[in-house]
Image: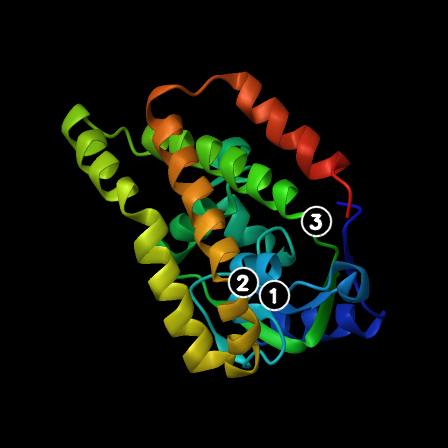
Amino acid sequence: EEHCEFVGRENLEHIKTLAIRGFDCIGGQILIGNEKKHGNPVSALCAFLPFLEPSVTGEYNSLPGYNAAYKRRALESVKKDLPLLFGYEALLLNEILKKKFKIYIEPSVKIKHYFENRNINTLKLSFFYNINFSHARKTYYHWSGFQVVMRTLMAVLIPFTRTIKFLIEIYRSKPGYLSGVLKNIHLVFLIHLSAGLGTLCGYYFWSNRHNVRFTQLEYNIER
């Protein structure tokens, strides 16, 4: 993606070293590439909270989405489902973790990510990503009608549960951002509200045009 880039050639050496040490999936620290233009870090925090500076070295159970490196053997372990899983990295990581592969974050590996420069664009991306992701989860795991109903009830609470969880994580791991986040708490709630609405729509109203729309936004939106 044009809005993501490794910072410096030494990143490749860090990744190579970690791969030799036995780690199968490797991510780094996310930098806001357009911070001066962007001004408001809320969308960056919602997308990459554990991986923004300061991030901590060690084993994780997730990676910064589409900003990571994988060993071939990890990907080949889910080869049959890879075309679907590559489109939804959270599903891919879930399946890789089930097979006991190791995920590692190294902050010296720096990745510059350019975020949307308008809040409305962040909300659109959140909605269309989640409408596709929830449909993919339902399909991949072959949820029954009862499971979809239960997930629907849970999805109604997404704006509230995720906002509370987000604030707790900010307080614990990134307190320097807390005052700025509280000033923009309405935006945090709206991002999670759009995610919840997208999730609900994905369970019942998904069509391939939603996938096309998300791809158009992801690649063409102003940053």
Q: How far apart in space, not on screen, are marks 1 and 2 (Cα)?
A: 28 Å
Q: Label 2, on which residue?
A: 184
Counting residues from the start of the chain, the first of labels 1 and 3 encountered is 1
User: What type is the residue that disc 1 sits on?
Assistant: Gly
Q: Is residue 25 visible?
A: no
At horizontal 58% and vertical 39% (from top left) the residue drawn is: 125
Counting residues from the start of the chain, the first of labels 2 and 3 encountered is 3
At horizontal 43% and vertical 21% (from top left) the residue drawn is: 206
Q: How far apart in space, not on screen, are marks 1 and 3 (Cα)?
A: 22 Å
Is 215 in front, or is 105? 215
Q: Is residue 99 left or right of residue 124?
A: left
Q: Label 1, on which residue?
A: 27
Q: How far apart in space, not on screen, are marks 2 and 3 (Cα)?
A: 16 Å
Specify how the rendered protein is coloured. Answer: rainbow
* Residue at the far left in the pictured view: 146
User: What type is the residue that disc 2 sits on?
Assistant: Asn
At horizontal 57% and vertical 69% (from top left) the residue drawn is: 51
Counting residues from the start of the chain, the first of labels 1 and 2 encountered is 1
Assess whether mark 2 and mark 1 are in contact (beta carbons under 8 angstroms).
Answer: no
Q: Label 3, on which residue?
A: 116
Residue 210 in percent (x, y) is at 54, 23
Residue 120 in percent (x, y) is at 62, 41
Asked which secondary structure carries label 1, the reply is: strand
Q: Is residue 14 visible?
A: yes
